[in-house]
């Protein structure tokens, strides 16, 4: 299984135009690293497609996309809810 | 007052002229006189700012249009221009469809221009390169198009915006925005209108748009001046002050003199909305408006 954090990093680099995404600390501010609002939408859409999930309204905030660790915990929450829903 | 009721009143007074499609209206000389007087009032307030006055067409090259991100953020409001491209054979079929009242959209092709949705868009490509140390201020007015048909006369599809645009360093732009957040409510007060300030967002499309809207609100990038034309509970935005950060500077390669990507902000007045707010507040007979208001509009 591909590590979720690594997938977030590569998505940020590819869809979020955050060129340093692979080397950033997990808690580092992504907006300071160059993530724009438009690019955060691209990141959201790419993650949604990859994991076949939908970010609920409650997660559509700036803070969700503020750091790799925030994105990771949002994804974890989404995927756990998804799994428990299916079982 | 309900939306349709106000529109009917404006029709009856001859101020607006129905054109057969919601959101498209003719205006009479009185309406235009009020609209232009309000516009002149705004211009007078910024008269000593050293702004450069520019005039552009209400059509944008499609390349500029797409670069601004408008089509991506507001596809439902967009107005790209389509025209017939074909030979005599296709022309014959096209005419047949028109005569039969059948849809003919498949005969039209996307062209290389689009109706401008905001009057400041054409200026950014013209500023590519390095700004002077003071940056720049531009004043501009144009017809804009947003495809949102409504019986609300305050929501036109084809309308005029007056904008002042500041481009420079973040400090210059933020200071200028602060100035207009003081000036704009005063302009409304001076003509007898009460404007309330509120944080707002643009109507970005769909779920992706919700993230854009939340982000815009959290950063307080858009401040609207709301006038209670239809009562205090649902006031209408007649003006907005927008901080774009480095969005346009980045897209169009504009740098401050220190080499950093330029920031920009604009203050925008929806001129038809401002005129209608005045008619709603003071009545359709301009001769009977309060002297104080008349003197402010026609000094």
Image (cartoon, coloured by chain):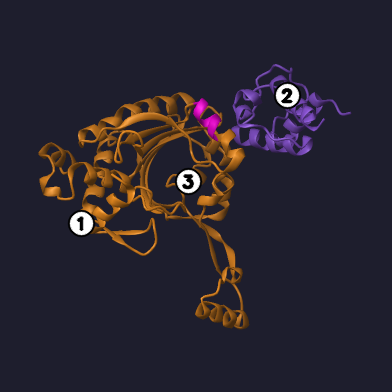
Chain colours: A purple, B orange
Q: Chain of mark 3?
A: B
Dominant SS in magenta: helix
Image coordinates of residue B132 in percent, x first then y, are 45, 33
Quadrant occupied by the C terminus of chain B: top left
Task: Read off the magenta span.
Answer: B213-219
Q: What whole-number distance in Å separates the C-alpha atoms at marks 1 and 2?
A: 59 Å
Chain bearing tag 2 is A
**Which of pointers 1 and 2 indicates the residue nearer the eye?**
2
The kind of secondary structure element at disc 2 is helix
Q: Which mark is residue B121?
A: 3
Horizontal side of residue B149 vs A3, given as left or right: left
Disc 3 with disc 2 on a shared chain: no
The percent position of residue B76, horizontal first and vertical second, equals 54, 51
Q: Which mark is residue B109?
A: none
Q: Quadrant of residue A39?
A: top right
The tag on residue A77 is: 2
- Mark 1 or mark 3: whose residue is earlier in sequence: 1
User: In terms of secondary structure, where does tag 3 sit?
Assistant: loop
Query: Residue B82, image x and y in percent?
Result: 55, 64
Residue depicted at x 36% and y 50%: B152
Badge 1: chain ID? B
Crowd rating for badge 3 (residues with CA inside 10 Å; few <14, some 14–19, many 20+): some
Q: Which residue is mark 1?
A: B13
Q: Look at 48% across and 35% down and name the residue there.
A: B201
Q: Is residue B229 left or right of residue B284?
A: right
């Amino acid at each position: 299984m591909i590590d979720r954090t690594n997938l977030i990093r590569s998505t940020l680099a590819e869809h979020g135009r955050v060129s340093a995404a692979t080397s950033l600390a997990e808690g580092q501010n992504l907006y300071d690293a160059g993530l724009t609002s438009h690019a955060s939408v691209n990141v959201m859409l790419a993650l949604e497609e990859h994991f076949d999930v939908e970010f609920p309204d409650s997660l559509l905030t700036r803070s969700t996309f503020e750091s790799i660790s925030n994105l990771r915990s949002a994804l974890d929450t989404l995927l756990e809810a998804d799994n428990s829903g299916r079982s | 007052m309900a939306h349709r009721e106000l529109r009917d009143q404006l029709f009856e007074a001859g101020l607006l002229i129905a054109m057969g499609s919601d959101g498209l209206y003719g205006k009479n000389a009185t309406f235009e006189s009020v609209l232009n007087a309000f516009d002149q009032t705004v211009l007078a307030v910024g008269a000593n700012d050293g702004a450069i006055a520019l005039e552009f067409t209400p059509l944008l090259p499609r390349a500029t249009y797409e670069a601004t991100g408008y089509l991506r953020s507001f596809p439902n409001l967009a107005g790209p221009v389509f025209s017939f491209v074909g030979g005599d054979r296709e022309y014959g079929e096209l005419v047949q469809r028109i005569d039969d009242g059948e849809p003919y959209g498949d005969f039209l092709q996307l062209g290389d221009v689009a109706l401008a949705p905001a009057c400041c868009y054409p200026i950014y490509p013209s500023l590519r390169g390095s700004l002077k140390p003071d940056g720049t201020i531009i004043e501009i007015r144009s017809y804009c198009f947003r495809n949102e048909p409504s019986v609300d006369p305050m929501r036109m599809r084809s309308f005029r915006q007056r904008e002042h645009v500041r481009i420079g360093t973040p400090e210059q732009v933020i200071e200028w925005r602060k100035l207009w957040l003081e000036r704009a409510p005063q302009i409304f007060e001076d003509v007898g209108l009460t404007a309330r300030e509120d944080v707002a967002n643009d109507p970005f499309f769909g779920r992706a748009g919700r993230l854009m809207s939340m982000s815009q609100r959290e950063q307080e990038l858009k401040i609207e001046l709301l006038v209670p034309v239809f009562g205090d509970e649902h006031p209408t935005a007649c003006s907005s002050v927008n901080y774009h950060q480095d969005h346009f500077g980045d897209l169009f390669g504009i740098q401050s003199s220190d080499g950093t990507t330029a920031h920009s902000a604009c203050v925008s007045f929806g001129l038809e909305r401002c005129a209608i707010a005045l008619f709603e507040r003071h009545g359709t007979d301009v001769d009977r408006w309060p002297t104080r208001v008349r003197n402010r509009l026609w000094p």
